[in-house]
Amino acid sequence: MDRKTQVSAGDGHQDIRITREFDLPRPLLFKAYTEPDLVAQWMGTRVLKLESKPHGSWQFQTVDAQGNVVFQASGVIHTFIPDRQIIRTFEIENAPFGVQLEFLNFEALTDTTSKLTMQIVYKSAELRNKMLQMPFSHGLNMAHNRLQQLVGKGC
């Protein structure tokens, strides 16, 4: 599978950089990150709360076929600049990673293409490395592929 979402992590650093170019105008890419129905579809999770505004909060949850919660994450949106930037915290419940700080920047490349650049900062390089040991980049690439397909079809 072609991996279009690029994840880079420098040795000894406590952050991850993620970049992905999309065949979507910037407003549509931004919408895919801020509209609950779209987020639920491309992430494959329940959106329990998504207040897309400064000082808003969010909460996502994934359950298995029996209804057991297998993933739950939440955070606070600190900065929200429409079509340009989201700065938020991200915390996975019952996980050893602690609270992450995420910087999401949305850039127009042309009228019909855009780029997402994310920087995720962890409390330590060790915690960041634990995240990198998981199939994190593969799952993110798959989710971004779904985002491109879903939003690209003009849902």
Image (cartoon, rainbow, N blue to C red):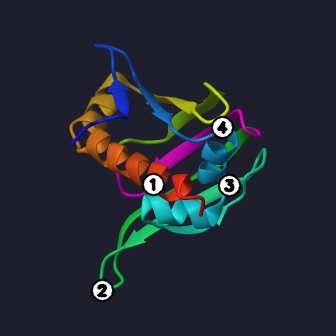
> Residue 102's spot in the image, x, y percent?
55, 35
Q: Main secondary structure of the magenta part?
A: strand
Binning the other alpha carbons within 10 Å of mark 3 as few (below 14), some (14 to 19) or many (20 upward) gives some
Spatial CA distance of label 3 from label 2 is: 28 Å
Which residue is depicted at the point 23% across and 43% down? Answer: 134
Tell me the tag on residue 66: 2
- Secondary structure under badge 1? helix
Contact, mark 3 vs mark 2 (Cβ under 8 Å) = no
Badge 4 or badge 2: first in the primary sequence: 4
Closer to viewer: mark 2 or mark 1 = 1
Q: Quadrant of residue 67?
A: bottom left
Tell me the tag on residue 57: 3
Spatial CA distance of label 3 from label 4 is: 23 Å
> Residue 25's spot in the image, x, y percent?
64, 39
Closer to viewer: mark 3 or mark 4 = 4
Which residue is depicted at the point 34% across and 43% down? Answer: 141
Tell me the tag on residue 26: 4
Residue 65 appears left or right of 43: left
Badge 1 or badge 4: first in the primary sequence: 4
Badge 2 or badge 1: first in the primary sequence: 2
Tell me the tag on residue 149: 1
